[in-house]
Image (cartoon, helix red, strand yellow):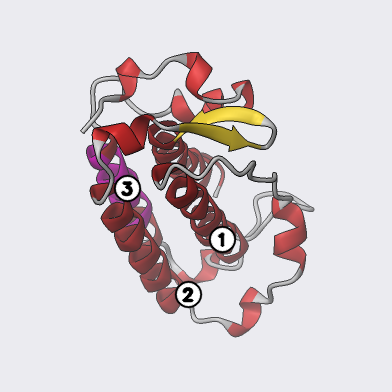
Amino acid sequence: MVKRNVLSPAEYAPFYAGYIDLVPADITLRTSLDDSAALLTDYLTNLPDEKVNHAYASGKWTVKEALQHIIDAERIFAYRALCLGRHDATPLPAFEHTDYALWVDVTRREFERMIEEFRTVRKSTISLFNSFSETDLSFTGTVSEMPMTCRAMGFVISGHTYHHNNIFRERY
Protein backbone atom coordinates (compact mmCIF):
# COMPACT_ATOMS: atom_id res chain seq x y z
CA MET A 1 0.00 0.00 0.00
CA VAL A 2 1.14 3.54 -0.74
CA LYS A 3 3.35 5.56 1.63
CA ARG A 4 2.39 9.09 2.61
CA ASN A 5 5.56 10.58 1.09
CA VAL A 6 4.35 9.76 -2.43
CA LEU A 7 1.26 11.95 -2.15
CA SER A 8 1.25 15.09 -4.23
CA PRO A 9 -0.33 18.27 -2.83
CA ALA A 10 -2.53 18.19 -5.96
CA GLU A 11 -4.28 15.13 -4.47
CA TYR A 12 -6.02 17.08 -1.70
CA ALA A 13 -7.22 20.54 -0.73
CA PRO A 14 -4.74 22.74 1.17
CA PHE A 15 -7.09 22.61 4.17
CA TYR A 16 -6.23 18.93 4.65
CA ALA A 17 -2.44 19.44 4.58
CA GLY A 18 -2.40 19.99 8.35
CA TYR A 19 -3.85 16.53 8.91
CA ILE A 20 -1.82 14.77 6.23
CA ASP A 21 1.43 16.34 7.45
CA LEU A 22 0.88 14.71 10.86
CA VAL A 23 1.24 11.28 9.26
CA PRO A 24 4.89 10.17 9.23
CA ALA A 25 6.15 10.39 5.64
CA ASP A 26 7.67 6.92 5.47
CA ILE A 27 4.72 4.80 6.64
CA THR A 28 2.00 3.20 4.58
CA LEU A 29 -1.65 4.10 4.66
CA ARG A 30 -2.48 0.85 6.46
CA THR A 31 0.21 1.45 9.08
CA SER A 32 -1.00 5.01 9.62
CA LEU A 33 -4.57 3.77 10.13
CA ASP A 34 -3.37 1.14 12.62
CA ASP A 35 -0.96 3.45 14.47
CA SER A 36 -3.25 6.45 14.78
CA ALA A 37 -6.02 4.25 16.17
CA ALA A 38 -3.67 2.52 18.60
CA LEU A 39 -2.33 5.82 19.94
CA LEU A 40 -5.81 7.22 20.44
CA THR A 41 -7.27 4.12 22.07
CA ASP A 42 -4.22 3.85 24.35
CA TYR A 43 -4.80 7.39 25.56
CA LEU A 44 -8.56 6.96 25.96
CA THR A 45 -8.45 3.63 27.76
CA ASN A 46 -5.95 5.00 30.27
CA LEU A 47 -7.79 8.26 30.89
CA PRO A 48 -8.95 8.72 34.49
CA ASP A 49 -12.75 8.76 34.82
CA GLU A 50 -12.74 12.32 36.15
CA LYS A 51 -11.26 13.60 32.87
CA VAL A 52 -13.82 12.04 30.53
CA ASN A 53 -16.19 15.02 30.85
CA HIS A 54 -13.41 17.60 31.07
CA ALA A 55 -12.99 20.42 28.54
CA TYR A 56 -9.61 22.17 28.53
CA ALA A 57 -11.22 25.61 28.10
CA SER A 58 -14.61 27.27 28.09
CA GLY A 59 -16.43 26.56 24.84
CA LYS A 60 -14.20 23.58 23.96
CA TRP A 61 -15.41 20.02 23.69
CA THR A 62 -15.11 17.51 26.50
CA VAL A 63 -13.12 14.36 25.81
CA LYS A 64 -16.39 12.51 25.17
CA GLU A 65 -17.61 15.19 22.78
CA ALA A 66 -14.30 15.20 20.92
CA LEU A 67 -14.38 11.41 20.65
CA GLN A 68 -17.90 11.57 19.22
CA HIS A 69 -16.62 14.11 16.69
CA ILE A 70 -13.76 11.77 15.72
CA ILE A 71 -16.22 8.90 15.20
CA ASP A 72 -18.65 11.03 13.17
CA ALA A 73 -15.89 12.54 11.03
CA GLU A 74 -14.38 9.13 10.32
CA ARG A 75 -17.73 7.82 9.13
CA ILE A 76 -18.08 10.77 6.76
CA PHE A 77 -14.47 10.51 5.58
CA ALA A 78 -14.90 6.76 5.00
CA TYR A 79 -18.05 7.39 2.95
CA ARG A 80 -16.06 9.84 0.86
CA ALA A 81 -13.32 7.22 0.43
CA LEU A 82 -15.94 4.65 -0.62
CA CYS A 83 -17.25 7.00 -3.30
CA LEU A 84 -13.75 7.80 -4.53
CA GLY A 85 -12.61 4.18 -4.38
CA ARG A 86 -15.59 3.12 -6.48
CA HIS A 87 -14.71 5.80 -9.05
CA ASP A 88 -17.83 7.85 -8.37
CA ALA A 89 -17.27 11.29 -9.90
CA THR A 90 -20.24 12.86 -8.12
CA PRO A 91 -18.99 15.92 -6.22
CA LEU A 92 -19.10 15.32 -2.46
CA PRO A 93 -20.18 18.22 -0.25
CA ALA A 94 -18.44 19.66 2.77
CA PHE A 95 -19.87 18.99 6.20
CA GLU A 96 -20.08 21.27 9.20
CA HIS A 97 -18.63 19.29 12.09
CA THR A 98 -19.84 21.73 14.74
CA ASP A 99 -23.44 21.27 13.58
CA TYR A 100 -23.10 17.52 14.10
CA ALA A 101 -21.84 18.10 17.62
CA LEU A 102 -24.92 20.16 18.48
CA TRP A 103 -27.21 17.21 17.87
CA VAL A 104 -25.59 14.51 19.95
CA ASP A 105 -25.91 14.16 23.70
CA VAL A 106 -22.82 12.28 24.87
CA THR A 107 -23.80 12.61 28.54
CA ARG A 108 -26.10 9.62 28.10
CA ARG A 109 -23.37 7.48 26.55
CA GLU A 110 -20.92 5.19 28.32
CA PHE A 111 -17.35 6.19 27.54
CA GLU A 112 -16.13 2.59 27.20
CA ARG A 113 -18.82 1.93 24.59
CA MET A 114 -17.73 5.02 22.70
CA ILE A 115 -14.16 3.73 22.65
CA GLU A 116 -15.43 0.40 21.33
CA GLU A 117 -17.47 2.24 18.70
CA PHE A 118 -14.33 4.05 17.55
CA ARG A 119 -12.51 0.70 17.30
CA THR A 120 -15.38 -0.75 15.27
CA VAL A 121 -15.53 2.22 12.91
CA ARG A 122 -11.77 2.11 12.39
CA LYS A 123 -11.85 -1.64 11.75
CA SER A 124 -14.50 -0.99 9.09
CA THR A 125 -12.39 1.82 7.60
CA ILE A 126 -9.38 -0.50 7.37
CA SER A 127 -11.49 -3.19 5.70
CA LEU A 128 -12.72 -0.62 3.20
CA PHE A 129 -9.21 0.50 2.30
CA ASN A 130 -8.06 -3.12 2.06
CA SER A 131 -10.68 -3.60 -0.64
CA PHE A 132 -9.23 -0.92 -2.90
CA SER A 133 -6.77 -1.60 -5.71
CA GLU A 134 -3.93 0.82 -6.46
CA THR A 135 -6.08 2.17 -9.32
CA ASP A 136 -8.96 2.74 -6.89
CA LEU A 137 -6.69 4.50 -4.41
CA SER A 138 -5.43 6.82 -7.16
CA PHE A 139 -8.89 7.87 -8.36
CA THR A 140 -9.44 11.62 -8.13
CA GLY A 141 -12.88 13.01 -7.40
CA THR A 142 -14.22 16.22 -5.92
CA VAL A 143 -14.60 16.74 -2.18
CA SER A 144 -15.67 20.12 -0.82
CA GLU A 145 -15.24 21.59 -4.30
CA MET A 146 -11.58 20.51 -4.46
CA PRO A 147 -9.77 17.53 -6.01
CA MET A 148 -9.18 14.56 -3.70
CA THR A 149 -7.76 11.10 -4.31
CA CYS A 150 -9.02 8.10 -2.42
CA ARG A 151 -5.58 7.47 -0.91
CA ALA A 152 -5.32 11.09 0.27
CA MET A 153 -8.69 10.64 1.98
CA GLY A 154 -7.20 7.69 3.87
CA PHE A 155 -4.31 9.81 5.09
CA VAL A 156 -6.79 12.52 6.10
CA ILE A 157 -8.53 9.93 8.29
CA SER A 158 -5.25 8.98 9.97
CA GLY A 159 -4.10 12.57 10.27
CA HIS A 160 -7.39 13.69 11.80
CA THR A 161 -6.98 11.01 14.46
CA TYR A 162 -3.34 12.01 15.09
CA HIS A 163 -4.50 15.64 15.36
CA HIS A 164 -7.04 14.92 18.07
CA ASN A 165 -4.70 12.54 19.87
CA ASN A 166 -2.14 15.35 20.03
CA ILE A 167 -4.72 17.78 21.42
CA PHE A 168 -5.80 15.26 24.05
CA ARG A 169 -2.25 14.65 25.19
CA GLU A 170 -1.27 18.34 25.19
CA ARG A 171 -4.38 19.95 26.65
CA TYR A 172 -6.41 17.43 28.59
At label 1, which amino acid type do we have? Asp
* Precedes in sequence: disc 1 or disc 2: 1
**Residue 117 lies in magenta, yes or no?**
no
Q: Nearer the viewer, residue 161 or 6?
A: 6
What is the CA distance from the residue labelled 1 to the residue labelled 2?
15 Å
Q: Percent position (x, y) of residue 39?
A: 32, 47
Q: Percent position (x, y) of residue 52?
A: 53, 67
- The residue that mark 2 highlights is 111
User: In which quadrant is the N terminus drawn?
Assistant: top left
- The residue that mark 3 highlights is 39
Q: Which numbered disc covers residue 72?
A: 1
Q: Which residue is drawn at 53% across and 69% down?
A: 50
> How many other residues sit within 10 Å of disc 2, few (<14), some (14-19) or many (≥20)?
many
What is the CA distance from the residue labelled 1 to the residue labelled 3?
18 Å
User: Which residues are drawn in magenta?
Assistant: 30-41
Q: Nearer the viewer, residue 84 or 25?
A: 84
Mark 2 residue element: helix
At label 3, which amino acid type do we have? Leu
Can residue 45 be seen? no
The reply to whether callout 1 and callout 3 are in contact (CB within 8 Å) is no
Q: Which residue is drawn at 53% across and 55% down?
A: 70
What is the CA distance from the residue labelled 3 to the residue labelled 2?
17 Å
* Precedes in sequence: disc 3 or disc 2: 3
At label 2, which amino acid type do we have? Phe
Q: Percent position (x, y) of residue 60?
A: 72, 52
